[in-house]
Amino acid sequence: MKRSTLFVLCLVCFLPLACEDAVMDVDPPIDSIEDSRLDSETQIPFLVTGLQARFASVYGRLSVFAGGLSDELVFDRTVPGATYPSYGELESGDIALGNTSTGNAMLLLAELRLMADTLITRVDRITFADESSKSYALHNAYLYGAIARYFWAAYWGLEEDQGGGVINAGPFIPSAVLYSDAIDQLALAMQFAPTPYDAKVASSLLARIHLQEERYADASAAAAAGLTDGDDSFSALFSTEVANFWHFAAGSGRTQFVADDRYVGYITDDPVEASRVPLTQVTAERYRQNRYPVSESPLPLLVWQEMALIRAEVALRDGQGQTALDLVNSVRQSHGLADLAAITLETLFVEREKELFCMGIRLLDQRRLGVWHLPDGTWKFLPISQRERDSNPNL
């Protein structure tokens, strides 16, 4: 599995050391560093590690909250551990602008975007002895900058049906513009990709964005250039010190969210489905996800199976049924599932929700396919926080 994050928290990397002139007679603190000292080729691995760590923190929360807002997860107060009112708001789609859970996640996302963009400007101030080190820095800066903008576009909104975000207390940026900015950054990430695998990762995220935009031909082309059978997933990794958020929100650490009942039905109909929809019983009637059984469980952002399903969907829309069937069956075979005899768009969408279980994708598919499960007027995005609205004059 591709290692995409370490457990070093590096927000301090971007904060200059204060009061240096006022206090001269003490040893420098060991948990901070002058910002100018980071303008060094030797600090690039450290800075990239900070990006990866922040990405993991953000993605863990977003994938859980997206699952709770979608029809993938359920907040049931009869389940021991399900007590947070802020999570209950996600379940109902009636989300307060002051929801602390979503507000804190938004702050982490803002930090991820800032860290990525700051690394780009920092590279311009460094004289590199090794051009490969510069390419490594730029690839990661553009990749995680693109991921941050994708997260803003896909998960956040100003109004219930209006997706988008804000950057640097600026004006509201609609999802379409953020997706376009992410696409531009992914092109640069591919330009500076250190390895063919790194280019595939960028192309895979590009394919997902194009699918959300319903630019089907572009989505298929990007997916074909993305991850393929045999490639490692691109994942956030965690540790006992920095845990996968699923562990304490919908896992063995604490079960706030449980899986929707239909996932239990999938396994009842075919027990082999447990290989991609792993569940564990928590009450007589409720089951939670077991895809991330421990706090260190990796959390995939991109997998080759998703690329195959994107290509299959586009093939079906183009009337290429056999091509689509072959692609879907290749995904099923990777889990030991029997081949399907035929495929339709409806059955393909079911394959997507099984394959991409607990990856934050179901919310995006529900909006894209017009299969919303909550009453009119409920949130289909996570709301930009009240704190941002109050402090940002552009909102």
Image: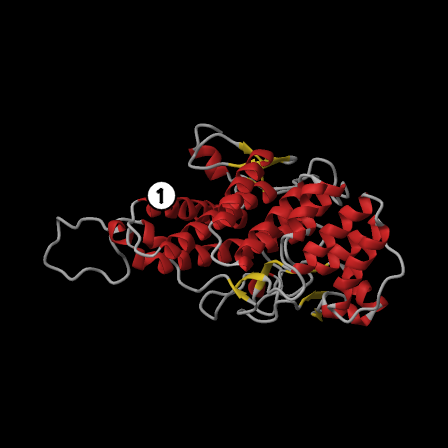
Residue located 40% across and 53% down the image: 137
Apparent side of residue 81 relative to residue 328 in the rendered image (left or right): left
| Mark 1: secondary structure | helix
Q: Name the residue tied to disc 1.
A: 121
Q: Left or right? Give the position of 83 relative to 92.
A: left
Residue 130 appears in the rendering: yes
Q: In the picture provided, is 106 more to the left or to the right than 32?
A: right
Report x, y in % for residue 151.
56, 46
Q: Residues within 10 Å of mark 1 (few under 14, many from 20)?
A: few
| Residue 247 location (% of width, % of height) | 57, 65
Q: Confirm whether residue 152 shows in the render.
A: no
Most extreme residue toward the top is 394
Q: Which of these two is toward me, 319 or 48?
A: 319
Does 157 appear above or below 47? above
Q: Identify the image quadrant of the N terminus.
A: bottom right
| Quadrant of res 342 | bottom right
Scheme by which the image is coloured = secondary structure
Amino acid type, mark 1: Thr
Query: Would you identify the image quadrant in which residue 132 lies?
Result: bottom left
Q: Nearer the viewer, residue 236 or 85?
A: 236
Where in the figure is residue 183, as x and y percent of width and height?
Answer: 56, 41
Q: Is residue 252 above or below residue 86?
A: below
